[in-house]
């Protein structure tokens, strides 16, 4: 097959005539408005207009793509071969509704990005169902010799990441996207800008979205329907490499040797890939709505990017792999099948109550299904299966906690609100009888704690606006309590926590706060000294590994550069990296805040044990 793909690439290169350009590129170079914009950029840069035009033409040769019918068909076959490790599961009813939308509108497909395979899977699924051709944006790092020439004939648009010092490039790309929209082309891009290293969505990148907004807001331009598409996998060959990078390993370059290695990996079956369509929306209507609320274009783009991320999360189904990984990571020891099922059962009930979709319609409590996933994770080297005793047990291998966490994190977004609700209840339960309460009473104390945790984790998770956040949290507490909690006493809060099933706060939040603890400790150690980011991250990684060995942090999954970088972003947001008044004191307060949050998670963890009825929770139970 590799020999056939090389021959395919060679024939494609022969067909690309020197000097030929795809339709949109030709139309753009003939556009008087584009000439005027080029002239303006040339004037600002102090360069010749002819030179700017030649530069733009060169960029169009680099980025512009088209769809050759025969080449696209052969590329789809190659993509199916790359996807041979998976069966792709699609909700055909969702696809049919999307096809109707495709017949009337240009689609802007914003997809989640967990694998290099995403860019093959999505066009293949849509192409096989006779959608209009899709133009997919990819990083220029994947524009490899020979293969890049083939890919550009199948709708792949290779774009550069670092363009700050290339004003003509930025203008050309923006104008090219505008021309695609004018021609009612479907476009697809990763809203995250690159593959997630943790399993959960990365913060959105605004580049392509900004250009789409510019195009839709242009005079006479057609609207674009934004379509979030989630794709999630039972397992991925790539995860071990990404988690090694999170431990400080150097990222391998994407070259032809990488492609060969990646293709060979796909020989081993890894289960299913689940492609789910989120709720589409009109880009123009959403822009008009946001502008009507007084938002600037920049603010509107930020809000739309978050809208897309929320819709992607809502569309992402729960996989059995994610739930099994959650159970084993939370236990941090070997479990029998019955123990795994005992942990999964309340989670499955909760997921059903919240009406979250389950991948492939699987029964999360089915004994055979859970056993199969345990065996598959053992086969792929994530778990160890020991059968030398009275019954088999499964545990996460020593160097595989970040891999298991990646799978767990594909579902973690549905559990965060519940986890925060548990901490809010605990804060109320810990109130002393002589505590001075705000005007809203104990309930207000709980809301304030929820907002504090939300603020602490806002660089990890996509939270909605405050009004929607409070509504979501009320839903969680209503499920937990079985009734609306308009008022609550510390004693009632303590009883609710004891009776709750499942307890999620420690399972969901501890890995992140353990990582924050390490970075906050290393930051506080510096007093009011100036900080170098790379030095601080290296120090955190070294100390995190030490603390893991000493069991000062919950598990190995918290020892991750990705999590330390997020903690660093939070510290920067709070003004803890730059010189300022009482800097050492504020850094120490940051550390204490995280320590107290972890103390409360430890209480929740203890409540999850079988003898939880005897666990002290309220202040009267001598927690403090």
Image: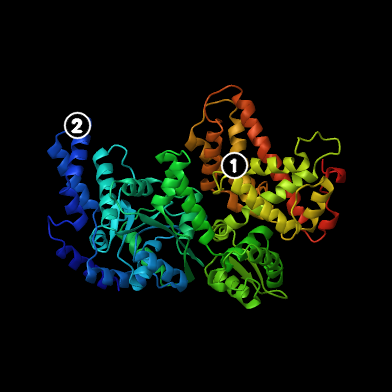
Q: Quadrant of the C terminus?
A: top right
Image x and y of residue 476, in percent = 68, 55
Q: Is residue 157 above or below residue 172?
A: below
Along the line of sight, the residue nearer the viewer: 624 or 443: 443
Image x and y of residue 172, in percent = 24, 45
Characterize the local packing of mark 1: few (<14), some (14-19) or many (20 or more) Cα atoms within 10 angstroms: some
Along the line of sight, the residue nearer the viewer: 163 or 49: 49
Viewer-nearest of labels 2 and 1?
2
Marks 2 and 1 sit apart, C-alpha to C-alpha, by: 53 Å
Q: Specify whether 414 is left or right of 533.
A: right
Q: Residue furthest bottom?
A: 368
Do the residues bearing badges 2 and 1 touch, measured as CB atoms within 8 Å?
no
Along the line of sight, the residue nearer the viewer: 158 or 334: 158
Along the line of sight, the residue nearer the viewer: 564 or 304: 304
Q: Could you tell me which residue is drawn at 79 percent across and 54 percent down?
A: 496
The disc at residue 43 is 2
Image x and y of residue 161, in percent = 34, 46
The disc at residue 543 is 1
Q: Specify whether 2 is left or right of 608.
A: left
Q: Specify whether 90 is left or right of 170.
A: right
Q: Secondary structure at mark 1?
A: helix
């Amino acid at each position: 097959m590799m020999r056939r793909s090389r021959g395919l690439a060679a024939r494609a290169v022969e067909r690309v005539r020197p000097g030929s350009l795809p339709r949109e590129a030709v139309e753009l170079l003939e556009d008087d408005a584009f000439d005027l914009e080029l002239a303006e950029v040339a004037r600002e840069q102090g360069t010749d207009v002819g030179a700017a035009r030649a530069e733009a033409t060169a960029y169009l040769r680099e980025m512009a793509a088209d769809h050759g019918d025969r080449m696209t068909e052969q590329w789809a076959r190659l993509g199916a071969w790359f996807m041979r490790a998976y069966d792709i599961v699609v909700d055909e009813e969702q696809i049919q509704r999307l096809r109707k939308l495709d017949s009337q509108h240009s689609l802007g497909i914003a997809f989640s990005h967990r694998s290099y395979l995403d860019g093959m899977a999505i066009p293949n699924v849509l192409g096989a169902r006779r959608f209009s051709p899709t133009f997919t944006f990819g990083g220029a790092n994947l524009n490899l010799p020979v293969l890049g020439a083939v890919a550009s004939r199948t709708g792949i648009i290779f774009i550069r990441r670092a363009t700050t010092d290339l004003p003509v490039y930025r203008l050309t790309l923006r104008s090219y996207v505008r021309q695609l929209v004018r021609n009612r082309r479907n476009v697809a891009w990763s809203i995250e800008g690159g593959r997630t290293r943790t399993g959960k969505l990365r913060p959105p990148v605004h580049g392509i979205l900004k250009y789409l907004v510019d195009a839709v807001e242009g005079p006479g331009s057609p609207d674009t329907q934004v379509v979030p598409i989630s794709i999630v996998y039972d397992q991925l060959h790539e995860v071990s490499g990404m988690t090694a990078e999170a431990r400080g390993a150097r990222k391998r370059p994407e070259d032809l040797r990488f492609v060969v290695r990646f293709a060979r990996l796909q020989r081993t079956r890894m289960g299913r890939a689940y492609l789910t369509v989120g709720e589409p929306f009109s880009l123009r209507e959403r822009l008009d709505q946001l502008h009507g609320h007084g938002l600037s274009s920049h603010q509107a783009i930020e809000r739309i990017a978050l809208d897309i991320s929320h819709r992607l999360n809502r569309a992402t189904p729960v996989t059995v792999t994610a739930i099994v990984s959650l159970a084993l990571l939370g236990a941090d020891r070997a479990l029998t099948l019955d123990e795994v099922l005992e942990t999964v059962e309340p989670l499955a009930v909760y997921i059903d109550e919240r009406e979250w979709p389950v991948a492939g319609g699987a029964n999360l409590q089915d004994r055979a299904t859970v056993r199969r996933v345990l065996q598959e994770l053992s086969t792929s080297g994530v778990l160890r299966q020991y059968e030398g005793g009275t019954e088999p047990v499964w545990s996460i291998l020593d160097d595989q906690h970040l891999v298991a966490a990646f799978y767990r994190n594909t579902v973690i977004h549905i559990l965060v609100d519940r986890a925060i609700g548990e901490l809010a209840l605990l804060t109320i339960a810990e109130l002393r009888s002589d505590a001075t309460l705000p005007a809203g009473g104990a309930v207000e104390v709980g809301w304030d704690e929820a907002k504090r945790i939300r603020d602490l984790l806002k660089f990890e998770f996509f939270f909605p606006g405050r009004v929607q956040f409070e509504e979501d949290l009320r839903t969680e507490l209503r499920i937990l309590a079985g009734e609306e909690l308009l008022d609550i006493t510390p004693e009632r809060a303590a009883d609710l926590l004891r009776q709750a099933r499942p307890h999620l706060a420690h399972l969901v939040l501890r890995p992140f706060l353990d990582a924050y603890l390490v970075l906050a400790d290393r930051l506080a150690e510096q007093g009011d000294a100036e900080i170098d980011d790379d030095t601080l991250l290296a120090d955190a990684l070294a100390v995190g590994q030490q603390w893991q060995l000493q069991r000062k942090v919950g598990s190995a999954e918290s020892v991750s550069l990705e999590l330390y970088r997020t903690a660093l972003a939070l510290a920067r947001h709070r003004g803890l990296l730059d010189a300022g008044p009482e800097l050492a004191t504020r850094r120490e307060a940051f550390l204490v805040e995280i320590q107290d949050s972890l103390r409360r998670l430890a209480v929740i963890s203890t409540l999850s044990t079988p003898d939880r009825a005897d666990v002290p929770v309220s202040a009267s139970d001598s927690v403090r």
